[in-house]
Image (cartoon, rainbow, N blue to C red):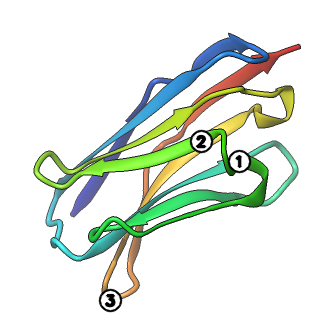
Amino acid sequence: QVQLVESGGGLVQAGGSLRLSCAASGSIFRTNIMGWYRQVPGRQRDLVAFISSGGTTNYADSVKGRFTISRDNGKNMVYLQMNSLKPEDTAVYYCKLTMLSGVGYWGQGTQVTVSS
Protein backbone atom coordinates (compact mmCIF):
# COMPACT_ATOMS: atom_id res chain seq x y z
CA GLN A 1 0.00 0.00 0.00
CA VAL A 2 1.23 3.46 -0.92
CA GLN A 3 0.29 6.63 0.92
CA LEU A 4 0.85 10.18 -0.25
CA VAL A 5 0.47 13.19 2.02
CA GLU A 6 0.57 16.72 0.64
CA SER A 7 1.33 19.86 2.59
CA GLY A 8 2.17 23.50 2.01
CA GLY A 9 -1.03 24.85 0.52
CA GLY A 10 -2.63 28.05 1.70
CA LEU A 11 -3.73 31.56 0.84
CA VAL A 12 -1.32 33.88 -0.94
CA GLN A 13 -1.58 37.15 -2.82
CA ALA A 14 -1.01 37.30 -6.55
CA GLY A 15 2.68 37.45 -7.32
CA GLY A 16 3.55 35.49 -4.21
CA SER A 17 5.08 32.06 -3.77
CA LEU A 18 4.22 28.75 -2.16
CA ARG A 19 6.06 25.47 -1.88
CA LEU A 20 4.08 22.25 -1.87
CA SER A 21 5.49 19.04 -0.48
CA CYS A 22 4.38 15.45 -0.92
CA ALA A 23 5.62 12.61 1.26
CA ALA A 24 5.30 9.10 -0.11
CA SER A 25 5.40 5.99 2.05
CA GLY A 26 4.73 2.29 1.68
CA SER A 27 5.76 -0.12 -1.06
CA ILE A 28 7.50 2.32 -3.35
CA PHE A 29 9.80 1.13 -6.05
CA ARG A 30 12.71 3.28 -7.15
CA THR A 31 11.49 3.64 -10.71
CA ASN A 32 8.39 5.79 -10.75
CA ILE A 33 7.00 9.10 -11.82
CA MET A 34 5.78 11.66 -9.33
CA GLY A 35 3.59 14.49 -10.39
CA TRP A 36 1.38 17.35 -9.33
CA TYR A 37 -2.13 17.85 -10.67
CA ARG A 38 -4.73 20.47 -9.88
CA GLN A 39 -8.48 20.65 -10.00
CA VAL A 40 -11.09 23.37 -9.66
CA PRO A 41 -14.73 22.55 -8.94
CA GLY A 42 -16.62 21.39 -11.99
CA ARG A 43 -13.50 20.81 -14.07
CA GLN A 44 -11.24 17.88 -14.76
CA ARG A 45 -8.03 17.28 -12.89
CA ASP A 46 -5.15 18.65 -14.96
CA LEU A 47 -1.46 17.86 -14.96
CA VAL A 48 0.75 20.62 -13.61
CA ALA A 49 4.15 18.94 -13.71
CA PHE A 50 5.81 15.58 -13.34
CA ILE A 51 9.28 14.29 -12.66
CA SER A 52 10.72 10.85 -13.25
CA SER A 53 12.94 9.03 -10.81
CA GLY A 54 15.81 9.96 -13.13
CA GLY A 55 14.97 13.65 -12.92
CA THR A 56 13.26 14.24 -16.26
CA THR A 57 10.62 16.92 -15.89
CA ASN A 58 7.64 18.13 -17.83
CA TYR A 59 5.36 21.13 -17.21
CA ALA A 60 2.00 22.37 -18.33
CA ASP A 61 2.40 25.40 -20.58
CA SER A 62 0.47 27.54 -18.11
CA VAL A 63 3.11 27.10 -15.39
CA LYS A 64 6.34 26.97 -17.37
CA GLY A 65 8.87 29.45 -16.04
CA ARG A 66 6.93 29.93 -12.79
CA PHE A 67 6.74 26.49 -11.19
CA THR A 68 9.57 24.07 -10.49
CA ILE A 69 9.13 20.42 -9.59
CA SER A 70 11.85 18.53 -7.73
CA ARG A 71 12.23 15.33 -5.79
CA ASP A 72 14.36 13.73 -3.12
CA ASN A 73 14.51 10.02 -3.88
CA GLY A 74 16.18 9.21 -0.57
CA LYS A 75 13.29 10.75 1.35
CA ASN A 76 10.54 9.76 -1.11
CA MET A 77 9.52 13.39 -1.37
CA VAL A 78 8.39 15.54 -4.26
CA TYR A 79 8.11 19.32 -4.18
CA LEU A 80 6.45 22.00 -6.24
CA GLN A 81 7.89 25.48 -5.93
CA MET A 82 5.30 27.93 -7.21
CA ASN A 83 6.38 31.50 -7.94
CA SER A 84 4.60 34.46 -9.49
CA LEU A 85 1.29 32.93 -8.55
CA LYS A 86 -1.84 34.09 -10.34
CA PRO A 87 -5.50 33.92 -9.30
CA GLU A 88 -6.04 31.31 -12.00
CA ASP A 89 -3.63 29.01 -10.14
CA THR A 90 -6.27 28.65 -7.44
CA ALA A 91 -7.17 24.97 -7.15
CA VAL A 92 -6.80 21.86 -5.08
CA TYR A 93 -3.38 20.43 -5.82
CA TYR A 94 -2.90 16.68 -5.79
CA CYS A 95 0.25 14.61 -5.68
CA LYS A 96 0.34 11.43 -7.76
CA LEU A 97 2.82 8.59 -7.83
CA THR A 98 2.79 6.30 -10.85
CA MET A 99 4.62 3.00 -10.73
CA LEU A 100 6.40 1.49 -13.70
CA SER A 101 3.46 -0.95 -13.96
CA GLY A 102 1.15 2.00 -14.57
CA VAL A 103 -0.61 1.78 -11.22
CA GLY A 104 -1.14 5.24 -9.78
CA TYR A 105 -1.73 6.53 -6.27
CA TRP A 106 -3.17 9.89 -5.24
CA GLY A 107 -2.82 12.08 -2.21
CA GLN A 108 -5.75 13.76 -0.51
CA GLY A 109 -5.03 17.18 -1.99
CA THR A 110 -4.09 20.58 -0.62
CA GLN A 111 -5.91 23.84 -1.33
CA VAL A 112 -4.04 26.71 -2.94
CA THR A 113 -5.85 30.02 -3.10
CA VAL A 114 -4.37 33.05 -4.84
CA SER A 115 -6.08 36.35 -4.17
CA SER A 116 -5.99 39.23 -6.64
Quadrant of the rendered image containing residue 84? top right
The front one of 17 and 87 is 17
Looking at the rendered structure, the kind of residue marked 1 is Val
- Asked whether the residues under the numbered discs 1 and 2 touch, taking CB atoms below 8 Å apart as contact, a structural biologist would say yes
Q: Amino acid at mark 2?
A: Phe
Name the mark on residue 45: none
Give x and y (percent) for residue 39. Answer: 72, 48
Please, is residue 27 above or below residue 106 in the view? below
Say which of 81 and 96 sits in front: 81
| Circle 2: element type | strand
- The residue that disc 2 covers is 67
Residue 83 lies left or right of residue 44; in this view the side is left
**Is label 2 or label 3 in front?**
2
| CB within 8 Å, label 3 to label 1 | no
Image x and y of residue 27, in percent: 14, 66
Q: Is residue 19 left or right of residue 115?
A: left
Going by the numbered disc 3, the residue's amino acid type is Ser
For marks 3 and 1, the one nearer the N-term is 1
Identify which residue is drawn at 25% across, 60% down. Answer: 2
Image vertical order of residue 57 relative to residue 64, above or below: below
86 relative to 76, above or below: above
Residue at 66% across, 13% down:
11
State the quadrant of the C terminus.
top right
Q: CA distance from mark 2 to mark 3?
A: 28 Å
Instruction: Name the residue tied to disc 3.
Output: 101
Q: Which residue does the image show at 46% across and 32% down from the upper left?
A: 20
Q: How far apart in space, not on screen, are marks 3 and 1 (Cα)?
A: 28 Å
Return the residue at label 1: 63
